[in-house]
Image (cartoon, helix red, strand yellow):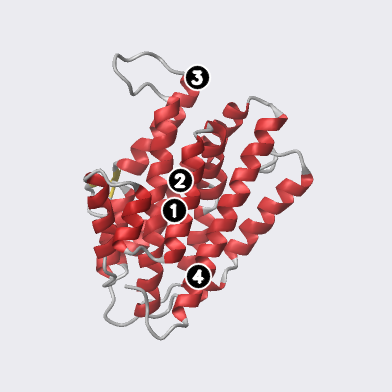
Amino acid sequence: MNQGEALAKDGRSFAALVGLRDRLSRHELYSRLTTTRNIAIFMKHHVWAVWDFMSLVKALQRQLTGIDLPWRPVGDPEIRFLINDIVVGEESDLDRHGRRTSHFEMYLEAMKGVGATTRRIEQFVALLSQGETVERSLELVGAPAASASFVRQTFAVIDRARVHEIASVFTYGREDIIPTMFIGMLDRLEVPEGVDLTDLRYYLERHIEVDGGHHGPLSRRMVELLCRGEERLRAEAIEAALLALEARVELWDAIVAKFDQVEGDD
């Protein structure tokens, strides 16, 4: 069975997913990552998607596992295993030096390696730690408009708290397409003189390895179990995934537009 068919028997829905995946895999963005400036612009916009991905992971863990006190078993044990296994990899993987770190922190190191400032995203996280809301923090730090829009779309799904939709966005809007996107980047990525892309390459290659070979199949199984074979839940899940893929295309389009501006977004 082709991936996606387990979610949607409706041919139009499946075709839409395939079409958006194909559009992302062939996006102009990848061929434009040939200068220090463009790589830095890309990373300063994409880091927000790396951050909100972790929020999707934790939203799933909150709903699907027992994290409250006193503890009690919650839901399906197989689903608990699937999400906990994914959380371990995303929140405490090994960097290229063999040190434990989250994929978000790994990405920040990669940004520093290419000279892309992490100022805004680090200020954003600091504001969250002080109790500010996501929306207010985006405004206070002046997050790039396209990145802020992407984050808002993600949190609209999280705030609805419909676990099959969150799982579908996580799976078909993120995990399932990441290997395709990142292979596209690696195939075209050139190394400008004087720029260290070692950490970025490791990050991309690690995601291709983990998401394509391990997390992808786990997350697809998770969505299948959460939909329980019900056509209504499948339709809602596929619609959430389509909106997430469309948001990714919009983000990529906006980044390419930034490449062509005289001044990049810092």
Q: Residue 262, position in %: x, y?
A: 40, 86
- Residue at the spot 40% in from the left edge and 31% down from the top edge: 61
Q: Is residue 183 left or right of residue 202?
A: right
Can you tell which of label 1 and label 3 is closer to the viewer?
A: 1
Classify residue 49 by image quadrant. bottom left
Q: Secondary structure at mark 4?
A: helix
Please state which amino acid type lies under the numbered disc 2.
Phe
Q: Residue 27, position in %: x, y?
A: 57, 69
- Residue at the spot 49% in from the left edge and 26% down from the top edge: 79
Residue of label 1: 151
- For the N terminus, the quadrant is top right
Can you tell which of label 2 and label 3 is closer to the viewer?
A: 2
Few, some or many C-alpha atoms within 10 Å of disc 4 (few <14, some 14-19, many ≥20)? some
The answer for how far apart the CA atoms under marks 3 and 4 are is 40 Å
Whichever of labels 2 and 3 marks the residue nearer the N terminus, that label is 3
Label number found at residue 155: 2
Label number found at residue 187: none
Q: Nearer the viewer, residue 100 or 228?
A: 228
Label number found at residue 76: 3
- Residue at the spot 49% in from the left edge and 23% down from the top edge: 78
Whichever of labels 4 and 1 marks the residue nearer the N terminus, that label is 1
Indicate whether 21 appears above or below 32: above
Determine whether label 2 and label 1 are within 8 Å by CB: yes
